[in-house]
Amino acid sequence: MKNRILIVVDDLSDAEMISKLLKAKFEISLLTNPSKFLNIVSQVKPNLIILDSLFNSQDLCNMLFKENTYSDIPVIILSSLPALSFDEILYPDRVIIIDFFDINLVRDKILEITN
């Protein structure tokens, strides 16, 4: 069974680029409406969640981690701002912030987390 990745982005072209890179090894689900976030997480049951930093990623992480059922799901936040940090994230050890434009690093981290 393939690992499942949920990608939450505001721009489908960004998600499609990541999906093309990973679809051979992973089952990919895309979400562009963060208001449906927890519902989709419960349906998809992802092994990894990738969030676009343009959404309120900190709030989405905290919503996820407050639900004990989901608190063990690792999260990658893609950011074009290298100094981005989130001081108020619950379980900060479950979150990795990666430069969106370093696609090889994104791929490598995803493979590392899901293996």
Image (tube, helix red, strand yellow):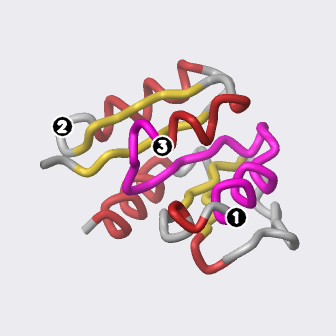
Identified by mark 3, the residue type is: Ser
Q: As rendered, which of 114 and 99 lies closer to the eye?
A: 114
| Tag 3 near tag 1, CB within 8 Å | no
| Tag 2 near tag 3, CB within 8 Å | no
Tell me if 3 is positioned left or right of 91 in this view: left
Q: Which mark is residue 66?
A: 1
Identified by mark 2, the residue type is: Ala
Secondary structure of the residue carrying numbered label 3: helix
Which residue lies at the image location 74% right of the left edge and 73% below the top edge?
A: 90
Spatial CA span between label 3 and label 1: 14 Å
Indicate yes or no whether the magenta region holds residue 2. Answer: no
Secondary structure of the residue carrying numbered label 1: helix
Tell me if 89 is positioned left or right of 87 in this view: left
Which residue lies at the image location 58% right of the left edge and 68% below the top edge?
A: 68
Residue 71, how many percent across, how many down? 56, 68
Q: Earlier in the sequence, mark 3 or mark 1?
A: 3
The 10 Å Cα crowd at callout 2, few under 14, some 14 to 19, many 20 or more, is: few
Which stretch is magenta?
Answer: 42-66
Identified by mark 1, the residue type is: Lys
Q: Which residue is mark 2?
A: 24
Spatial CA span between label 2 and label 3: 23 Å
Residue 54, how many percent across, how many down? 78, 38
The quarter of the displayed image where residue 13 is located: top right
Q: Which residue is mark 3?
A: 42
Which residue lies at the image location 64% right of the left edge and 56% below the top edge?
A: 64
- In the rendered image, which quarter contains the C terminus? bottom left
